């Protein structure tokens, strides 16, 4: 009696059944099959996920690991396409795992023995997955055409509802309907903006009233702008992936906002647009480098009424406190000076060891290259012996497999030699030290743009932390070298 696993996957509703009903029906069919054929079920894998890629199918990944480990004699599936409708790489991986582990595949209509000498099974398997892939693409195209057609008729086909709406089923599809609580917030945003309130002011007001976004996050000015520009609120739907003249189409839902109110908001947004980019000139030498440790946003330089520069987090209600910019800049240069000393000490302490290691690796690489060349010559000789009739086909295949396994092992060892982390780190440090020295020596003489460029060449990003007004700030620097 063989030990088997059952793999169950559902990607969409079938025969108007729920997911649980479909999986239960398939499981019963496979249990009956196993009982009729004296197969012992050791494990069952279930998932509801699209069949496009193995990377998104965690139960399939677990199954392949267990199959590779030789846990089962066979795997039972309703039909071959349940294993994969993915790309050729996914299909090749499945074939390789089942073939090398000598694990059969049972469907309700056929048994595939990929490890046998019978090439027909392997061809059937590859052809079955190929046809499954074609069918999957056809279904996707059909569904896309159906979604676009429904959208052009005014039905909502998106997966994420616009803020302010829920949906209900009508006739051929779903129609947006107002969500009373959220709809009031949307109307408040438009009314306040047209009345003269700014984006930041509106965000502050909503957050102060506890009127958060649907995901529980606080409102930000950019999110307020997105709401104001969304034509869904005047009865339109956004059309994606459709070759039509207009990317918006009339929806079946009733508008939340009067057209004139929406038009007034657009006129104000347009009139304020030129003020967004006042200048392309860089005025902050730390631009795009410093991040807030609390919310992850980029820190910005602000100037108060007394013309004092501060480094601040721009996220509303963030707990991080600002600091005088010159203090942050001074602390950064001190920490870069310490980093330079650390790099120089690393070179002094490790140069001899890494140079010796590099010499040993170079000698070993020469020996491995010689062995690789030798195996290549031996493989060529095998072909000659087969052509001369000295090797039978069986002996040729056996010998070639041994040589290819040895060659693959040598190539892997050679690759590992070229990936030495210590040597790469030493090389990065030696390259970066002159740049860091120049930065520290010439920093005060550079203009803002040059300071920003040289800092960005050295630093991945800087994490700024200050949780209380009187607390000293800290900087955590992530160097590129």
Image (tube, rainbow, N blue to C red):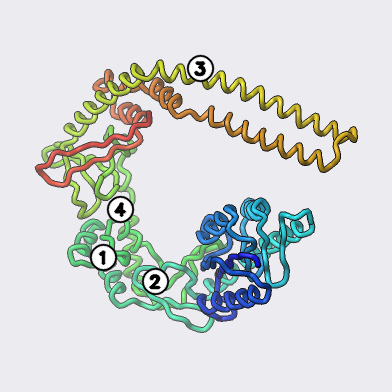
Q: Quick check: 176 left or right of 379?
A: left
The residue that mark 3 highlights is 359
> Which element type, helix, strand or loop, lies under badge 2?
helix
1 or 3: tag closer to the N-terminus? 1
Query: Is 303 above or below relative to 43?
Result: above
Q: Nearer the viewer, residue 222 or 161?
A: 161
2 or 4: tag closer to the N-terminus? 2
Q: How far apart are labels 2 and 4 at the CA level?
A: 22 Å
Q: Position of residue 351 (x, y in %)?
A: 39, 17
Q: How far apart are labels 1 and 3 at the CA level?
A: 62 Å
4 or 3: tag closer to the N-terminus? 4
> Which element type, helix, strand or loop, lies under badge 1?
loop
Mark 1–mark 4 CB contact (< 8 Å): no
2 or 3: tag closer to the N-terminus? 2
Q: How far apart are labels 1 and 4 at the CA level?
A: 26 Å
Of discs 1 and 3, which sits in the foreground? 3
Query: Is 406 above or below relative to 374?
Result: below
Mark 2–mark 4 CB contact (< 8 Å): no
Q: Position of residue 113 (x, y in %)?
A: 72, 59
The image quarter in which residue 15 lies: bottom right
Around disc 4, counting alpha carbons within 10 Å, would you say few (fewer than 14), some (14 to 19), or many (20 or more)? few
The residue that mark 2 highlights is 234
Residue sitting at x 58%, y 58%: 71
Give the residue furthest to the bottom. 171
Q: How far apart are labels 2 and 3 at the CA level?
A: 72 Å
Of discs 2 and 4, which sits in the foreground? 2
Q: Nearer the viewer, residue 346 or 365?
A: 365
The residue that mark 4 highlights is 272
Around disc 3, counting alpha carbons within 10 Å, would you say few (fewer than 14), some (14 to 19), or many (20 or more)? few
The residue that mark 1 highlights is 212
Of discs 1 and 2, which sits in the foreground? 1
């Amino acid at each position: 009696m063989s030990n088997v696993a059952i793999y169950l996957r559902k990607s969409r509703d079938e025969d108007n059944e729920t997911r649980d009903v479909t999986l239960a029906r398939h499981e019963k069919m496979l249990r009956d099959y196993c009982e009729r054929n004296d197969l012992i079920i050791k494990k069952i894998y279930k998932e509801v996920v699209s069949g496009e890629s193995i990377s998104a199918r965690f139960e399939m990944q677990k199954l392949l690991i267990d199959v590779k480990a030789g846990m089962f004699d066979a795997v039972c599936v309703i039909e071959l396409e349940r294993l994969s409708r993915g790309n050729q790489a996914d299909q090749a991986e499945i074939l390789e795992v089942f073939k090398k582990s000598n694990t059969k595949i049972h469907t309700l209509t056929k048994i595939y023995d990929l490890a046998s000498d019978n090439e027909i099974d392997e061809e059937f398997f590859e052809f079955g997955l190929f046809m499954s892939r074609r069918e999957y693409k056809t279904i996707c195209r059909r569904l896309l055409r159906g979604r676009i057609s429904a959208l052009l008729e005014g039905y909502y086909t998106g997966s994420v509802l616009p803020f302010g709406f829920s949906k209900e089923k009508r006739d051929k599809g779903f129609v947006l309907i107002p969500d009373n609580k959220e709809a009031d917030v949307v109307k408040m945003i438009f009314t306040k903006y047209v009345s003269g309130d700014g984006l930041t002011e509106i965000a502050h007001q909503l957050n102060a009233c506890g009127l958060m976004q649907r995901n529980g996050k606080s409102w930000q000015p950019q999110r307020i702008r997105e709401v104001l520009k969304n034509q869904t609120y005047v009865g339109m739907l956004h059309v994606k992936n459709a070759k039509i003249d207009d990317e918006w189409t009339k929806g079946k839902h009733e508008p939340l906002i009067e057209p004139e109110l929406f038009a007034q908001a657009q006129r104000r947004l347009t009139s304020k647009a030129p003020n967004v980019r006042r200048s392309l000139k860089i005025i902050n030498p730390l631009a795009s480098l410093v991040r807030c440790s609390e919310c992850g946003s980029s820190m910005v330089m602000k100037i108060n009424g007394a013309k004092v520069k501060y480094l601040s987090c721009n996220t509303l209600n963030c707990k991080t406190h600002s600091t005088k910019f010159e203090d942050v800049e001074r602390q950064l240069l001190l920490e870069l000076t310490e980093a330079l000393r650390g790099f120089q000490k690393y070179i002094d302490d490790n140069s001899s060891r890494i140079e010796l290691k590099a010499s040993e690796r170079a000698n070993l690489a020469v020996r491995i290259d010689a062995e690789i060349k030798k195996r290549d010559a031996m493989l060529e000789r095998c072909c000659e012996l087969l052509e001369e009739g000295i090797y039978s086909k069986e002996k040729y295949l056996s010998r070639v497999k041994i040589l290819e396994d040895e060659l693959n092992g040598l190539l892997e060892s050679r690759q590992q030699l070229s990936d030495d982390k210590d040597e790469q780190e030493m090389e990065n440090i030696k390259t970066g030290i002159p740049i860091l020295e120049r930065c520290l020596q010439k920093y005060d003489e550079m203009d803002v743009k040059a300071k920003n460029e040289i800092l960005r060449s050295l630093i991945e990003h800087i994490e700024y932390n200050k949780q209380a007004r009187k607390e000293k700030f800290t900087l955590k620097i992530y160097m590129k070298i």
